[in-house]
Image: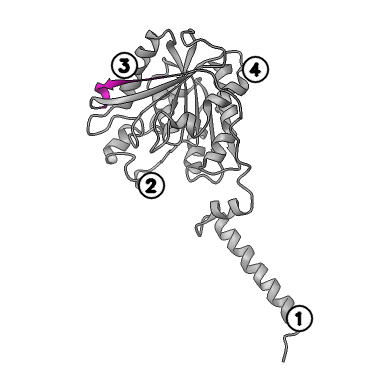
Amino acid sequence: MPPSRRSFLAAGVGALAVGSAGVGLVETHVVPGRTTLHTALGLTGENGTIPDVEPGQRVTGSFRSAALGDAQVHWAAAYPPGSPTDAPLPVVLALHGRDGDHRSAFDDLGLDRFMAAAVAKWPTPFALVSVDGGAATFWHRRRNGDDPQAMLLTELLPLLSERGLRTDRIGLFGWSMGGYGALLLAERHPDRVAAAAALSPALWENYDDVRPGAFDNETDFRANDVFADQRPLDGLRLRIDCGQDDAFAAATRSFVRALHPRPSGGFQPGAHTIGYWCRMVPDHLAFLAWNL
């Protein structure tokens, strides 16, 4: 006997109820897949697009870093269009994410082209400088002696100063691992940092949640815990953004709530993706230009 219209309706209502319940469980993180679901439904926002413009000049170089075990460290400095490479501009250090290097800021995020598209509106043009910080150092001193913060402060910045750039007070921009690194560096050296912008910072409140390789052990985590003392950031010109579907969103919210005053930025539709980062980069660069 064929099913009746009533049985079809009942089945449809039941499927809808099950589907709605499933979505609810995903939304409350009872089952995994929230980011995948939101991406499929178009709830993580549009991907940003790197501007199709001609960037300014870029200078590259390398040096032997005593702070990184005598490694050959490469760096790149992007200048605004029309700016000579000996212009006395302030510096914004761009700290790359995990598995990145000095090319990531330009090849992946297009920072030089975002700068070229917007610099005419900025009150303070600057040089964007990216450097090899190590694939997974998380921008802090490690058990093997590698110390990327020392490399930045005692090797890279003096080198940039010799080239005529202004390095007494710097800007910081970092994403993911580099977002954590920017916050850590700003906490430890607020006297050197004029403004900092952290995008999707890789933050953990508890050592049990840490991704393998980010810290040597729990002692290393405690020694470099950005939650431990956030007071040096009080009053610093600071912007923090994170996608609502980012795995680091909860920890980032906790970090932001403890800051006084509350930093610029917020939590937008988005995940831990290049598309989200490219959408947010223009706001971060403009923030730095207005606060250096």
Label 1 packing within 10 angstroms: few (<14), some (14-19), many (20+): few
Displayed quadrant of residue 149: top left
Disc 1 marks which residue?
Answer: 6
Under mark 4, the amino acid is Lys
Q: Residue at x 43, y 38 (%)?
A: 203
Whole-angstrom CA distance, mark 2 to mark 3, is: 32 Å
Whole-angstrom CA distance, mark 1 to mark 4, is: 64 Å
Q: Say how the picture is coloured.
A: one colour
Label 3 packing within 10 angstroms: few (<14), some (14-19), many (20+): some
| Residue contact between numbered discs 3 and 4, judged by CB atoms under 8 Å | no
Relative to 33, say whether 240 is above or below: above
Disc 4 marks which residue?
Answer: 121
Disc 3 marks which residue?
Answer: 154
Q: Earlier in the sequence, mark 1 or mark 4?
A: 1
Residue 39 showing in the rendered view? yes
| Residue contact between numbered discs 2 and 1, judged by CB atoms under 8 Å | no
Q: Residue at x 68, y 76 (%)?
A: 11
Under mark 1, the amino acid is Arg
Q: Which residue of the protein is positioned furthest toward the bottom in this rendering?
A: 1
By secondary structure, the bulk of the magenta-drawn segment is best described as strand
Find numbered disc 3 in the image and state the secondary structure of the residue it sits on. Answer: helix
Q: Which mark is residue 209?
A: 2
| Residue contact between numbered discs 3 and 1, judged by CB atoms under 8 Å | no
